[in-house]
Image: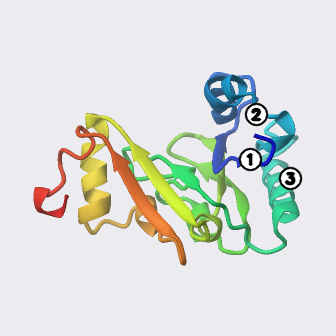
Amino acid sequence: MGTDFFYFGDERNVGPDEDASNFKAANMSLFRPLRIREDNIFRWRTELETPADVAEDYEQTLQKLSPDVPRFDLILLGIGTDGHTASLFPDTEALSETARTATANWVPQLGTWRFTLSYPVINNARNVLFLVAGEGKAAIVSEVLEGEADLPARSVHPVSGKLMWLLDQASASDLDNSNI
């Protein structure tokens, strides 16, 4: 497994050992069981002093991967009931970020900072996979795939890659069956 590298699309503004940390969840359920080497895992260093420092540090990490916009083989995304993906939330500044690859995003509806890759990075991936489960996501999946609302997840369009949705039956239950 020495040639597999793992980066994070987003992170919460919590320490890496806190229960709300995306890194902690991935570390406990994926990296440790598969014995992924620590130097192959690139997490957001949320322990840095300010949100701007965290974003700048991750952007520098990405620049070591590629001086331009990095091209990931796979970006795995979820979706929130408000249509957010990664930490690209409705009505937040990160939605319009095109100059930076990684950014700190103030999310007023949550009252906290989140960290996220920008659309240029997500849309540069070879493969983007939305993984969605549960009846609670059915309405938003339908709105993103069949509606017209301006939602963050609708702005995911790989420029020269594939976009895939992996849905369980419950999350797909509001879709027009003629499109399935």
Percent across and percent down for residue 59 are 81, 59
Provide the secondary structure element on which disc 3 rests.
helix
Q: Which residue is mark 3?
A: 57
Q: Mark 3 near mark 2, Cβ–Cβ under 8 Å?
A: no
Q: Residue at x 27, y 42 (%)?
A: 171
Q: Earlier in the sequence, mark 2 or mark 1?
A: 1
Front-most of residues 165 and 134? 165
Residue type (three-letter) at the residue carrying disc 2: Ile
Secondary structure under the numbered disc 1 in the rendered image: loop
Q: Earlier in the sequence, mark 3 or mark 1?
A: 1
Percent position (x, y) of residue 100?
Answer: 74, 68
- Point 24% across, 64% down: residue: 146
Say what amino acid the circle numbered 3 marks: Asp
Of the 4 image quadrants, the one containing the C terminus is bottom left
Mark 3 crowdedness (10 Å alpha carbons): few <14, some 14-19, many ≥20: some
Measure the alpha-carbon separation of dots 3 and 2.
22 Å
On the image, numbered disc 1 is attached to which residue? 4
Type of amino acid at the residue the image marks with label 1: Asp
Q: For residue 60, what is the image quadrant?
A: bottom right
Q: Nearer the viewer, mark 3 or mark 1?
A: 1
The residue positioned 82% from the left and 34% from the top of the image is 37
Label 2 Cα neighbours within 10 Å, binned few <14 / some 14-19 / many ≥20? some
Q: Which residue is mark 2?
A: 36
- Tell me, yes or no, whether the two marked residues, 2 and 1, touch with CB atoms within 8 Å: yes
